[in-house]
Image (cartoon, grey):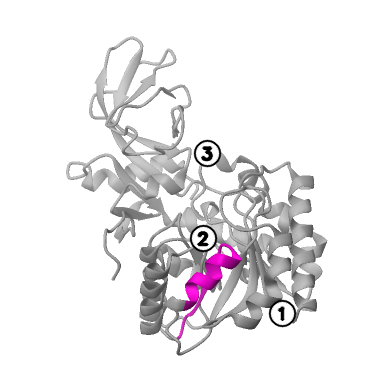
Amino acid sequence: MHAPQHTRLDAAVAPLVERLATPALFIDLDAVDHNIAAIVGRCGGGQRWRPHVKTIKQAALLERLFAAGVRACKCATLDELRMVLETASSTGTRGVDVLVAYPLHPGALEAAIRLAQVHPSVRVSFLADSPEHARALQGASDGERRWPLFLDVDTGMHRTGTFAARWAAQIRDLAAHLKGFEIVGLHGYEGHLGWDQRAEAAAGYDALCELARRLGDAGVTIAEICTSGSHTYAAALDHAGLAGGPWHHTVSPGTLVLSDRRCGPAIAELGLLQAALVATRVISRDGVRRITVDAGSKAIAPDCPAPTCEVVGWPELFPQTPSEEHLPLDLGGLAPPALGRLLWLVPQHVCTTVNLYRVALLVRDHAVVGESPIASGHHPWLT
């Protein structure tokens, strides 16, 4: 990996460039393996890392996590759950543990349980948004077993979950009458906080630890506390209470596997490499002020304001506000690249970028080595 990344990518795509439809998503496997190793090292091994697979959405990348010793993960959609279950089964990976970290309605829970029953070697846990939600899920349980259940705790993001005090007040009645589920964990996601907001993060972690102790006093043993995405994992890993309790603590950054422009502090701490890039072509140029490429909001970071990306190897090119299929770039005084020239974009937000594609091209060293289907999009029917 000594050559600049865009040079290696140019070499990899050169034999295929005439066939390549742009925009196209490329995954640099060397960078993926580097990032996984860095995160596993920071976590003191793979056991404290439960990465969210909403970023990668690909069996080929999940297999690399398995190969690195990471066995626990979490997901949000049924397609992601299916990908985890089928990848674990097809690779013969034992000890895989997936948390569906999303408040499913009863019909979706029934569909998830049907998927889990086909792959009994994988441990599947579910999430209760509130005491009312936990009770509503009971009718969807298959009645044949007690499924592991995490309680979603609102630590300040106010997106899902219930405040710790409310969980504590209702836990005795809930645990006594809950059918089909066993409360085993707490889930607290502080996605509203940034890298430097350690005091605010610590307050949420303290609340989770105190709730776990209060539940223990009520006869409910908490085996795991799961926290933290890509912007707060360091604060959580360094929190003495989370690390020192009678429970197992995990963090769940998934973005870091591929990295993106929003991960600056994590890149600095871990030495992460950009692993997901969008290939785009120059389709227009005025010869003076700007060029336009074919990677608009339907190709890269649709949820982000400009700039939605950066151009690898061309720091002077500055992305302007995209249209759906067009991305104008300010030339910054440069001579314009030729029409048809291939450029490489690093997304501001990689999760929403990956979700726009059905297939990624996998690159290792200087060659395209495969295609990787992506579990993206939404289906109208539960199966």
Q: CA distance from mark 2 to mark 1?
A: 24 Å
125 relative to 324 in the view: left or right? right
Please, what is the three-letter code of the amino acid marked with disc 3? Arg
Which sits in the foreground, 128 or 288? 128
- Going by the picture, which residue comes out furthest to the left? 19
Among the 4 quarters of the image, the one containing residue 166? bottom right
Q: CA distance from mark 3 to mark 2?
A: 18 Å
Q: Earlier in the sequence, mark 3 or mark 2?
A: 2
Q: Which residue is mark 3?
A: 261
Q: Position of residue 86 (x, y in %)?
A: 36, 75
- Going by the picture, which residue comes out furthest to the top? 288
Callout 2: 10 Å neighbours few (<14), some, many (20+)?
Answer: many
The magenta region covers 121-138
What residue lies at 30% left-to-right and 60% top-to-bottom?
373
Q: Earlier in the sequence, mark 1 or mark 3?
A: 1
Asked whether disc 2 touches disc 1, contact meaning CB atoms under 8 Å apart, the reply is no
Residue 52, which numbered label? 2
Q: Earlier in the sequence, mark 2 or mark 1?
A: 2
Which sits in the foreground, 140 or 94? 140
